[in-house]
Amino acid sequence: MEYPIVNSIDNCFNGSGSIEITDSPAKELKNVLAHIISRDYAANTREAIIRDIRDFIEWYEESYGERFSFWRTVERDIADFRDALRRKWRAVSTVNRKLASIRILYDSAMEMGVISKNPCRKIKQLAIQWLSPKWLTRQELRKFLKEVEIRWSSRDKAMAYLMAHSGLRVGEVVRLETKDIHIWERSGYVDVLDSKGNKSRKVPLPLAVREALTEYLDERLVKYGKSSGSLRLFLWQRWPLTEIAVNKAMDIYSKASGLSVNPHRLRHTFAYAYLEANPGDIVGLAQILGHSDINTTSIYTQNRLEDLQKRVEGI
């Protein structure tokens, strides 16, 4: 049998190519993928899992010249795929993420009774020495935010402050509605109702964020009126802003400041500033950031590569 021009996973999504979707291995794969897609994953997570599974199946079929089949996969195949990724100089975190996605594939096949033995069971992820995520120093943050203020965009200032001083994710920022903002003279908070993992939380707003939001809300009222055509907080010509639009806006200020800044780095910056002001309060930080696993938050207790470099230079 000739190796199909369109691989097995492509056939599952478009039904084309030389593999009949009614063929048992192809049908099993399609059913398992449909089961994974139906799970309650965030959209980006779901896309990453399917992309990783696609990489594995393409590697499998190119390596063996045969269609992918659950019952023909052995432990050695998973280990060889892991090693092949490492030979391509893939980051350890990327390799481990792909292994986790493959484990989801075979765990799902086990749940559905497609296989009775999981070839991923004994496969170990690569060891990794975690370093802290990159963040901005106080001076760098001031320099970045100065570029935002110089351009007189109260909307962009409010967005940047929510990420840098309250730790919101960019996806959470664009999904905020005006009713989610609660501001008083001496306090305030934001309801994050559509967070990662379908969680909700209340995030306290410091004075700087309250002032930035108040300024923007006043301007928004004058510009769009009470009936703006959208319930979303952040708009562009009456249309809700997207994550891509926010990233592009932050990129403009990043280049103007001569720094490398993106929304996630602003969130990291908040996390470090919080721990600097409240040493050891990992639980409080996890609550604000919306982490369900405190181990995720503990990465902010690690050293930056730049800090370690300075220390070894002094030896």
Image (tube, rainbow, N blue to C red):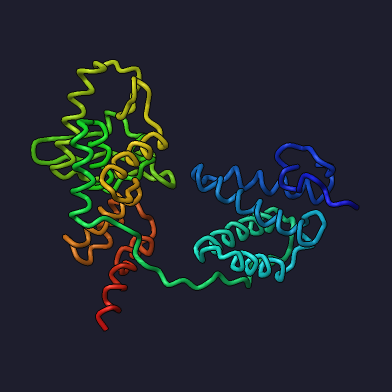
| Labels in figure, total | 0
State left or right for residue 196 relative to residue 17: left
Q: Residue furthest bottom?
A: 315
Q: Residue at x 73, y 37 (%)?
A: 14
Q: Position of residue 135 (x, y in %)?
A: 29, 57
- Quarter in which the C terminus is drawn: bottom left
Q: Residue at x 82, y 56 (%)?
A: 66
Q: Quadrant of residue 182?
A: top left
Q: Position of residue 173 (x, y in %)?
A: 33, 38
Q: Residue furthest left?
A: 185
Figure check: 86 above or below 169: below
Figure check: 244 above or below 67: above
Q: Residue at x 39, y 45 (%)?
A: 199
Q: Nearer the viewer, residue 216 or 313?
A: 313
Q: Position of residue 127 (x, y in %)?
A: 50, 73
Q: Nearer the viewer, residue 60 or 104?
A: 60
Figure check: 15 above or below 118: above
State left or right for residue 65 relative to residue 52: right
Q: Quadrant of residue 78?
A: bottom right
State left or right for residue 301 relative to residue 244: left
Q: Nearer the viewer, residue 18 or 145?
A: 145
Q: Residue at x 37, y 27 (%)?
A: 240
